[in-house]
Amino acid sequence: MVTVEAAKKIIAKHINPLGKETVPLQECRGRFLAENILASFPMPRFDNSAMDGFAVRAADTIGSTKEDPVSLKLIGGIAAGEPGDLRLAKGECVQCMTGAPVPDGADAVVMVEDSSGYDNGDTIKIFLETKPGRHIRYKGEEIEEGATLIMQNEVITPAELGTMATFGYGEAQVYRNPRIALFATGDELVEPGRRLEPGEIYNSNLFVLSDLTTKQGANIMMHETIADDPNALKLFLSRALKECDVIISSGGVSMGKYDYVREIFSELGVEEHFWKVSQKPGKPLFFGTNSDTLIFGLPGNPVSCFIGFMEWVWPVLNMIMGGRDQELIPAILTTTFPRDRYKTRFLFGKAWFQEGHLVCAPSSKVGSHMLSSSLNANCIIRTDPGDSHLSAGRSVQLRILPWKPIT
Ligand code: AMP
Ligand code: MG
C-alpha cells in the first residue's frame, strides 16, 4: 500500500501532455493552448471614434455652448468599416460613427447628442467645448503589436476565444484530446430503466464516469458494462489498450473472488505501478501503464469511484490535455470531520462564504456506498491521517467541484 503523496509522485512520472494539433477556432473551446498567442497587430489597429458623432478639431470648439454654439462645415462622413481618407481643415467637421477611422486633422469626436445632429444640412452646430483626444480610441493604446496575449497551456474560455478572434486567428494549436475507454464491471449491474431482479443493483458508476470524462472535454471512444467474466474483460481491454490513451474502470479490482480486472490487466501486459492507496474511501485503486496508455482501476463502491475519479483521474486528464493540476484550497470546518487514524480521508462536502471566510462541512453520510452524499456537495474535503476527529474551527483542504459554484 502506498500513501496518497507517494502515489501522486508515481503517477507524475508517467504522464506527459499528448501531442499537439491545429484546429479551427470554432473547435477550440475548452481546449488547452499548445502555443503562445501574440498580437499580430496593435489594438486598436487605427485611431477610431469611440462614439457616434462628429470628428472635429478641438481648438475649433473653444468657448462653444448650447446657447452660443460654434458652427462647423460638414465635409463628409465615415462609417465603421470605411477607410476614412478625408482630411479636416480649420472650421470643418466629419460625421464619424463608432469604430470608424478618425480623419486626418481631427483630434476629438463630439457626440451627436452634443450637436445639432445628422441630416441638418452642411453646417453643424457644436454645443460644447471639447478637448484633444476626447472620444478617440488611439492606435495601440490597449495592446502593442507583438505582445503576448495568451500563454501556452491556458484553457480556452470565452475570453480566450474572443481575444483570438479579435486578432484574426482562424485556428490555433492545442493539445490533442485524450481517447478514453470506460467500463464498469459486475454481474449484479443492471442499466437504469430496466427491471431489477433480487440481488441486482443499478449501474450508476458508468453515468458518473461518463459525465466527468465529458466535462473534462475528453473523447469517450469505448463505453461498456461488462460482467465479471475474464473473457469479456479481455476482449474489451485488448481493444482499449490499442485504441485509447486512458482506460478507466469501475469495480472488480478489490479482493473479491470475482474481481478479475487486475489479473486481466496483468495478462495483457499492463505494468502495475500501484494497487492499494492509503486512502478512505477507495483503497483498492489500481494504476498501471501499457506503452503510452494510462490505466486507472477505480473501486466499484459509488463514492470511492466518484471521489477516486476526481482525485486521481481528473487532474491527470487535465495535465495530459495541457492544463495544470488544480490547487486545493483551505477552508474552516463548521462541524466535526471524522478523520482517519492511518489514511488520508476524503468526503463530499459543502463550502460557502461566512463573514468573508470560506467555511465547509462534510456530508453526514460517510459510507463509501452512500452516493447521496454527493448531492448538494460542491467540494471534496480532504484530511491527512490523525489520531482524533477534527473539530469545528480547524482548517481542511478542499477540491472544488468546478461545475458547482460556491454560493
Ligand atoms: P467491487 O469493487 O466490484 O467489489 O464493488 C464494490 C461495491 O460497489 C459493490 O457493492 C458493488 O455492487 C458496487 N458497484 C460496483 N460497480 C458498480 C456500479 N457500476 N454502479 C453502482 N455500484 C457498483
Ligand atoms: Mg464487483
Image (tube, rainbow, N blue to C red):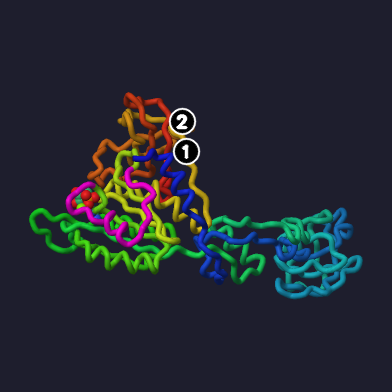
In the rendered view, tell whether residue 348 sits above or below residue 61. Answer: above
Residue extending furthest left?
Answer: 198
Q: Which residue is mark 2?
A: 355
Instruction: Give how far across and how far down residue 253 sits, in percent.
Output: 26, 51
Instruction: Give how far across and how far down residue 62 sits, in percent.
Output: 87, 55
Q: Amino acid at mark 1?
A: Ile
Q: Residues within 10 Å of mark 2 (few under 14, many from 20)?
A: few
Total numbered circles: 2
Indicate the secondary structure of the residue bearing disc 2: loop
Q: Which quadrant would residue 200 be assigned to in this image? A: bottom left
* 4 to the left or right of 237: right
Residue appearing at x 57%, y 55% in the figure: 154
Q: Nearer the viewer, mark 1 or mark 2?
A: 1
Residue 329 is marked as 1
Residue toward you, 115 or 108:
108
Which residues are drawn in magenta? 255-276
Indicate the secondary structure of the residue bearing disc 1: strand
Residue appearing at x 34%, y 34% in the figure: 343
Q: Residues within 10 Å of mark 1 (few under 14, many from 20)?
A: few
Q: From this viewpoint, is residue 276 visible?
A: yes
Q: Quadrant of the C terminus?
A: top left
Residue appearing at x 88%, y 66% in the figure: 105
Residue toward you, 321 or 81:
321
Could you tell me how far apart the alpha carbons at marks 1 and 2 are, in whole angstroms?
17 Å
Q: Quadrant of the N terminus?
A: top left
Q: From this viewpoint, is residue 136 visible?
A: no
Instruction: Give how far across and how far down residue 394 sits, in percent.
Output: 41, 26
260 inside magenta stretch? yes
